[in-house]
Image (spheres, helix red, strand yellow):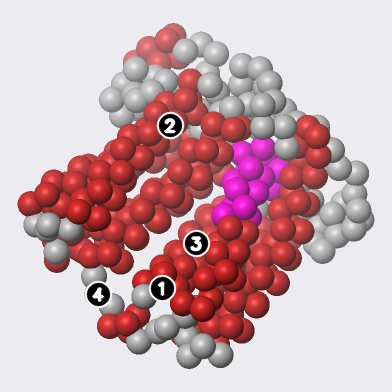
Amino acid sequence: MNYIKNLSFIGICMAFVVIALGAWTRLVDAGLGCPDWPGCYGFIVFPTNEAEIAIAESRYPMFPYDINKAIPEVVHRYFAAALGLIAIFLVCLSFEKTDDKSIRGWSIFLLIFICCQGVFGYLTVSLKLLPIIVTTHLFGGFTTLTLFYFIYLKSRNFQIFNLINISHLKTIAAIAFVVLIFQIFLGVWTSTNYASLACADFPTCQGSYLPEMDFRNGFNLNQEVGPNYLYGLLDNPARVAIHYTHRISAILVTLIFLILMSRLWFSDAAPLASTVGILLLTQITLGIINVVYVLPLYVAIAHNLVAACLLLAIFTINYLTWKR
């Protein structure tokens, strides 16, 4: 079981790296840094000299080669592939090192899910950053992280968890988990539709608490975007609708989390309440900095990573409510 515990922990760390690299790729507009898949302009890695660049641009004349965009895309792909290898080893270990059918089943499911992630990675490129595909792919990254974490929890017996009894908090914990997933979806949808800077002021949006918004187009999941969605094709009111919804939803998440934290605090689970509180405050602060300072790269990446930490924290709470 120790092998599974250690490998799943490595998988968690690697999943965080892949999420950060995915955010980096997206934030520097490198989603089409390589217009083909799984190679890059037909090369295993990416073109590096003038001859290779000439070949690359002759193959894809509609996509001028930019090494500053090719590098993030290729690095992200190879780290994601490494995550798949970890999942394969995890399945093998689940058959060799344990008789726990639950861990075995979840390991197989994780591997299948990562294969599906690879398919969506291909579709992301082949469909030229279609928002619903990109959103599904990015959301899948959070799911992959959670699956590795779940296997890690099942393979290790944390003594402190055995001392915490919060089974009476199933309802509020489940509500917090659902609203957080919805908020993460809104954050991903905001990013994939290039709406992060639709509101450049805070707490108002374009100088108003009720700016002009187009929800119909902003949340049209079946939108037709033409051959290439790089930099987005939505009108400003549609992007404002997406961004502002993400802000309002953050208020709802905060209120529900405060209720959950207070219930945890009075249920002798103060460490869990404090962890959620610190992560929530950090996430809100990062969100505000992103707006005020026009989406600094490393702050925006941190915003993604803290969202992932919040997801694991709330997942842990839900895990403990059902553990007994």
Which residue shows up at 15% across the image and 52% down it? Answer: 94
Q: Are marks 1 and 4 in contact (CB under 8 Å)?
A: no
Residue hosting label 3: 311
Label 4 packing within 10 angstroms: few (<14), some (14-19), many (20+): few
Residue hosting label 1: 320
* Residue in front for this viewpoint, 201 or 71: 201
Q: Earlier in the sequence, mark 3 or mark 1?
A: 3
Q: Secondary structure at mark 3?
A: helix
Q: Are marks 3 and 2 in contact (CB under 8 Å)?
A: no
Distance between the alpha carbons at the discs numbered 2 and 4: 35 Å
**What residue range appears in magenta?**
180-196
Whether residue 304 is situated above or below residue 161 in the rendered picture: above
- Residue 88 sits inside the magenta stretch: no
Q: Secondary structure at mark 2?
A: helix
Whether residue 228 is situated above or below residue 29 in the rendered picture: above
Three-letter code, disc 2: Gly
The mark closer to the camera, 3 or 2, is 3
Image mark count: 4
Residue hosting label 2: 121
Q: Which of the image's four quarters has the N terminus?
A: bottom left
Which residue shows up at 66% across the image and 45% down it? Answer: 190
Three-letter code, disc 1: Leu
* Residue in front for this viewpoint, 185 or 291: 185
